């Protein structure tokens, strides 16, 4: 199974080249919120996608527009023939538009702008991709909070491994009032830019974006002369069964997911070169994730960093965005540092990538995504070989 | 991941047995109550009563979670949870919590959002609570694939079994109705055309074991369509139906997704939750321009072409048309196969349609009364 297409859009910009450069320069997309007003709330940084990075076109929800941009870039000029699999991970779907309708009409019909309601269901993103790109086949939308698109990619890879002719897999989430207000209510937002694994970290910073991968059988990719960008070697998923919002204090589900991903890949802990952590910057997540990584890797702990200081926490899109960033890092032989990290929390005991990043050959990366309700996902990704 | 050779055809996923069924439906909590309710005409597709509250935890969970938990517990029965995967399907998630958040946003502003409502509005919240209540520590996924959310969850569950990520899978689907949803359906003219959203929950336990029922096939398809369009042309529906024809056999029970038969058709005595009758042989006429009306005749035209002798079931009249209704209709079809056994094996096809062009075909097989 091969990854032959990659599309990526975040507050850092659009496309692989922009993101490679942003990672090398340790840039952050976090800045003032301009997408909507948040009266009565403290101003906290977010990572918004620049309007110029979106394609003009017919009336799409913000989430659909983000997804379509990334999916188009993943496909390029290629259009898969025949039915395949579209797998999308998202938590917000079209809620940004639904908010606007509700604020005007308070649940009544509001006929003059009812088009805003068309996008509410999470599954409309997959439908819109199928319509705009002319794709047929199965459509699955995964909505497991922050692990959504990691599951979408894992499931799609599993389908291709079982014989599906192609899969377009990834995720998207747009900034919206509900998540901004919701995380504020949970007291999980950092007042400044997030600082993953930092001694003084205070919480997460929200972002938005989308990433999609095109997966197909390796033989088919070679037959049509496609460039192989990498492989999904393994997918692990496990539940904490502990609490609606807090992770298991000993990382029970995270450990199980990581171990399952490694087993699925047929690899041992010592064969992972780099970990793109979930690394949100909350005290609980970073602590638990560190425990889990140490439990799995023991003395063979690879270099670890979080890219959420660069992109913000893109919620349902995080798994796909970070998988795509891993592929770029594997290809370039560059492990990025953690933007926002000033003084590492020594109690975590992690081997963090140095500030500014480090060059060196990378063959295998692990990408973690841990969602609300203890919904844990881990992906093992490998570099392509000629 | 272990990959098969490209020269091998795409294999069907190995098909498991149905080890347990559970349901919360309008007028019925549990399969036994549904069997009794099926003898009465359907009422409004809303759940008025949720059974014995004492069986639930002391904390009063949200309505959607309660429906899902009751159905899940009924399906799981006394099976152990070791090696169990959980897949939850919901089209809209915690709608009541979402509306509470939106109302708070409108009336009090973003600074005063409810943290409880926020996490309850997340689509996977119910799955998280199910995993807590049942102590499921294996894979836990949530599907939100519009009106095929239950079927999508089923397919994800089958993939977990096929890839040996789980030895058994509990697939649960649940959705609820709130006034804002009805308002949206009305705004788009769907209510006037008989596409009424309902609510409820269903659950199936899949895996190896002794059962008279097996899941023979689960196929999803979709053609590019506008977000509010259903498949208005039988040509879009035929490829999937023809693809499962061999698995289904010549004389199936077919559960249709579209609302019930036209008012001017003669009715036959009801033997199930909706009406059951052989497909009329007369022409159904041309499809009107409206896709939702066209979908009714497109579905029946396609089914008639593949299975002229099919026994049709219109459970959508009882359950409503909503993202979890497909799994509810699957449970009802399974119950119907058991209630009307034949000497030999017989299949039920549960057909699904979704706004945006999605389609599904799930095939159940009952081994027959002569099987020992």
Image (cartoon, rainbow, N blue to C red):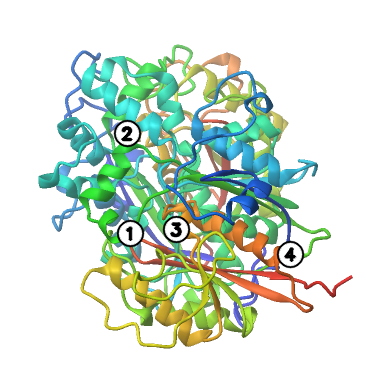
Q: Secondary structure at mark 1?
A: loop
Q: Nearer the viewer, mark 1 or mark 4?
A: 1
Q: Chain of mark 3?
A: B
Q: Is residue B119 left or right of residue A364?
A: left
Q: Pointer 3: residues within 10 angstroms few (<14), some, or many (20+)?
A: many
Residue A207's disc number: 2
Q: Residue at x 63, y 24 (%)?
A: A248
The quarter of the picture where the N terminus of chain A appears is bottom right
Q: Residue at x 16, y 54 (%)?
A: A59
Are the two marked residues, 2 and 1, in contact with CB atoms closer than 8 angstroms?
no
Distance Cα–Cα, label 1 vs label 3: 9 Å
Q: Chain of mark 2?
A: A
Q: Is residue B224 left or right of residue A320?
A: left
Q: Secondary structure at mark 2?
A: loop
Q: Pointer 2: residues within 10 angstroms few (<14), some, or many (20+)?
A: many
First along the sequence among labels 1 and 4: 1
Q: Residue at x 57, y 42 (%)?
A: A377
Are the two marked residues, 3 and 4, in contact with CB atoms closer than 8 angstroms?
no
Residue that label 3 marks: B317
The answer to whether any part of residue B364 appears in the image is: yes
* Whole-percent x, y for residue B323 in the image: 44, 52
The answer to whether any part of residue A382 appears in the image is: no
Have a look at marks 1 and 4 and say if they share a chain: yes
* Whole-percent x, y for residue B253 in the image: 59, 73
Distance Cα–Cα, label 4 vs label 2: 47 Å
Distance Cα–Cα, label 3 vs label 2: 43 Å
Q: Secondary structure at mark 3?
A: helix
Distance Cα–Cα, label 3 vs label 4: 25 Å
First along the sequence among labels 3 and 4: 4
């Amino acid at each position: 199974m091969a990854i032959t297409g990659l599309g990526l859009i975040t507050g850092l910009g659009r496309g692989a080249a922009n993101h490679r450069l942003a990672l090398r320069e340790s840039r952050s997309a976090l800045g003032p919120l301009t997408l909507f007003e948040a009266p009565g709330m403290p101003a906290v940084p977010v990572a918004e996608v620049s309007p110029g990075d979106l394609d003009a076109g017919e009336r799409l929800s913000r989430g659909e527009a983000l997804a379509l941009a990334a999916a188009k870039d993943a496909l390029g000029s290629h259009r898969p023939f025949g039915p395949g699999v579209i797998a999308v991970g998202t938590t917000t779907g079209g809620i940004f538009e639904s908010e606007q309708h509700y604020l005007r009409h308070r649940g009544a019909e509001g006929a003059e702008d009812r088009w805003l309601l068309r996008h509410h269901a999470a599954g409309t993103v997959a439908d819109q991709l199928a319509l705009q790109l002319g794709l047929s086949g199965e459509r699955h939308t995964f909505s497991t909070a922050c692990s959504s698109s990691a599951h979408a990619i894992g499931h799609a890879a599993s389908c291709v491994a079982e014989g599906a002719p192609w899969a377009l897999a990834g995720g998207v989430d747009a900034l919206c009032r509900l998540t901004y207000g919701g995380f504020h209510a949970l007291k999980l937002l950092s007042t400044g830019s997030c600082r993953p694994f930092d001694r003084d970290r205070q919480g997460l910073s929200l972002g938005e974006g989308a990433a999609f991968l095109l997966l197909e059988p390796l033989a088919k990719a070679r037959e049509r002369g496609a460039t192989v960008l990498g492989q999904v070697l393994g997918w692990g998923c496990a539940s904490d069964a502990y609490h609606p919002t807090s992770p298991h204090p000993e990382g029970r589900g995270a450990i199980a997911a990581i171990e399952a991903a490694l087993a699925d890949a047929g690899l041992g802990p010592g064969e992972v070169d780099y970990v793109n952590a979930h690394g949100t910057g909350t005290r609980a997540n970073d602590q638990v994730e560190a425990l889990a990584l140490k439990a799995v890797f023991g003395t063979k702990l690879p270099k670890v960093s979080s890219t959420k200081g660069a992109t913000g926490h893109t919620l349902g899109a995080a798994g796909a965005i970070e998988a795509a960033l891993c592929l770029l890092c594997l290809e370039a032989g560059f492990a990025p540092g953690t933007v926002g990290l000033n003084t590492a929390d020594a109690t975590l005991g992690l081997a963090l990538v140095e500030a500014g990043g480090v060059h060196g050959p990378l063959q295998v990366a692990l990408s973690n995504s841990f969602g609300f309700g203890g919904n844990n996902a881990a992906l093992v990704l490998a570099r392509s070989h000629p | 991941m272990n990959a098969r050779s490209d020269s091998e055809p795409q294999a069907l996923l190995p098909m498991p047995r149905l080890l347990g069924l559970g349901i919360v439906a309008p007028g019925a909590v549990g399969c036994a109550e549904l069997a009794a309710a099926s003898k009465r005409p359907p009422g409004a597709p809303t759940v008025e009563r949720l059974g014995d509250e004492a069986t639930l935890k002391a904390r009063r969970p949200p309505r959607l979670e309660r429906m899902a938990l009751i159905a899940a517990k009924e399906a799981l029965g006394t099976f152990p949870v070791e090696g169990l995967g959980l897949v939850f399907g919901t089209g809209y998630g915690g709608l009541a919590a979402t509306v509470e958040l939106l109302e708070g946003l409108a009336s009090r502003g973003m600074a005063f959002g409810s943290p409880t409502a926020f996490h309850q509005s997340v689509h996977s919240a119910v799955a998280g609570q199910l995993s807590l209540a049942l102590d499921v520590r294996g894979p836990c996924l949530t599907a939100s694939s519009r009106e095929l959310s239950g079927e999508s969850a089923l397919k994800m569950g089958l993939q977990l079994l096929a890839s040996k990520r789980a030895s058994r899978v509990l697939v649960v689907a649940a959705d609820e109705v709130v006034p804002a949803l009805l308002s949206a359906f009305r705004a788009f003219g769907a209510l006037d055309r008989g596409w009424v959203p309902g609510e409820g929950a269903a659950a199936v336990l899949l895996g190896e074991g002794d059962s008279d029922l097996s899941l023979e096939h689960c196929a999803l398809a979709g053609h590019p369509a506008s977000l509010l369009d259903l498949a208005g042309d039988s040509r879009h529906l035929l490829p999937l139906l023809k693809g499962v024809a061999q698995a289904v056999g010549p004389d199936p029970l077919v559960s249709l997704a579209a609302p019930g038969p036209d008012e001017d058709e003669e009715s036959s005595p009801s033997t199930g939750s909706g009406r059951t009758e052989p497909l009329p042989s007369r022409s159904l006429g041309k499809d009107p321009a409206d896709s939702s009306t066209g979908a009714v005749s497109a579905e029946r035209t396609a089914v008639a072409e593949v299975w002229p002798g099919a026994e049709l079931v219109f459970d959508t009249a009882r359950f409503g048309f909503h993202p979890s209704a497909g799994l509810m209709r699957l449970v009802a079809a399974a119950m119907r196969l058991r209630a009307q056994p034949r000497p030999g094996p017989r299949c039920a096809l549960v057909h699904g349609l979704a706004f945006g062009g999605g389609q599904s075909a799930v095939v159940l097989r009952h081994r027959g009364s002569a099987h020992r």
